Image: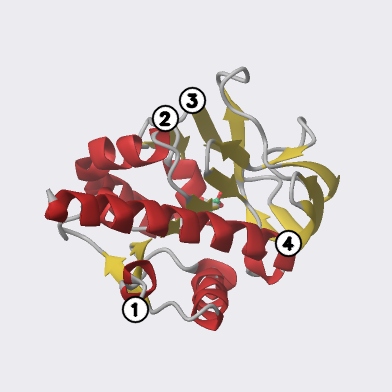
Amino acid sequence: MTDPVKAAPIKIAYLYEDLMNTYGDSGDVKILRYLLEKQDYQVTVTNISLTDDFDAETYDFLFFGGGQDFEQTVVAKDLLRHKATLAHYIETGKPMLAICGGYQLLGDYYKTAEGTVIKGLGILPLHTVFKADSRMIGDTEFDTAFGKVRAFENHSGRTYFDDPDKLKPLGKVIQGYGNNPEDGVEGLHYKNTIGSYAHGPILKNQNMATAISKLIVKNHQERITKQLTKTSI
Ligand code: GLN
């Protein structure tokens, strides 16, 4: 008998794939697809773009890549439509990876070089301020709960946590800047949502890729099992 969990495709939503994909970030999704297909799962990746309908609960994993200020401004306006579904997804511990511009937009706001304040989703208590005189660019290395991660960062936005009791960083900086030049920490780890400035892509680090692919499989199993119980009642 075929296993219904294996027979149902793993569904990945790539938020604004066409606009948010700087410095190799789409490679994160390709790596996950590779790891999951190796375990005999079928994988579908859906680009959720401007004006598209979106229900986070129908996916096993959400990916949100980096983007420059112009794209971020366009995306930020559209994104607010999805606040409720994204907040519920994150709060219920489903897996998500958000890089750079995507990570910034999970927070309250992003203040650009021109001083314009881009409203973020406001799901996580953090904010980002653009500092023109010191772009944080170069190789980066940090220690995480998954082991050491090596990547590349390129951002002018400095991210600060507004509720450090609620939010924990993804890692401790060994080389580079991470969230900002002062705190010595990189990214965010809240429930099963990971935010990071690491491009390159970050999931070329096998430890991180394996950990995230396990979370995806677990969420997929739960989603399909729930669906099956519903239909058999
Ligand atoms: N525009 C943002 C910054 O410079 C994000 C850059 C990115 O996502 N690569 O901070």
Q: Nearer the viewer, residue 63 or 184?
A: 63
> Which residue sits furthest front?
1
Q: Can you tell which of label 1 and label 2 is closer to the viewer? A: 1
What is the x, y in percent for residue 135? Answer: 68, 51
Left or right: 80, with 181 as reference point: left
Residue hosting label 4: 207
Q: Nearer the viewer, residue 150 or 153?
A: 150
Q: Residue at x 22, y 50 (%)?
A: 229
Residue hosting label 1: 2
Q: Residue at x 45, y 39 (%)?
A: 93
What is the x, y in percent for residue 181? Answer: 76, 37
Q: Is residue 126 above or below residue 176?
A: above
Q: Are marks 2 and 4 in contact (CB under 8 Å)?
A: no
Q: Quadrant of residue 74?
A: bottom left
**Amino acid identity at mark 1:** Thr
Q: Can you tell which of label 4 and label 3 is closer to the viewer? A: 4
What is the x, y in percent for residue 182? Answer: 77, 31
| Gap between marks 3 and 2 measured at Cα | 6 Å
What is the x, y in percent for residue 103? Answer: 50, 46
Q: Are marks 3 and 2 in contact (CB under 8 Å)?
A: yes
Q: Quadrant of ligand 1?
A: bottom right
The numbered mark, 4 or 3, whose residue comes first in the sequence reads 3
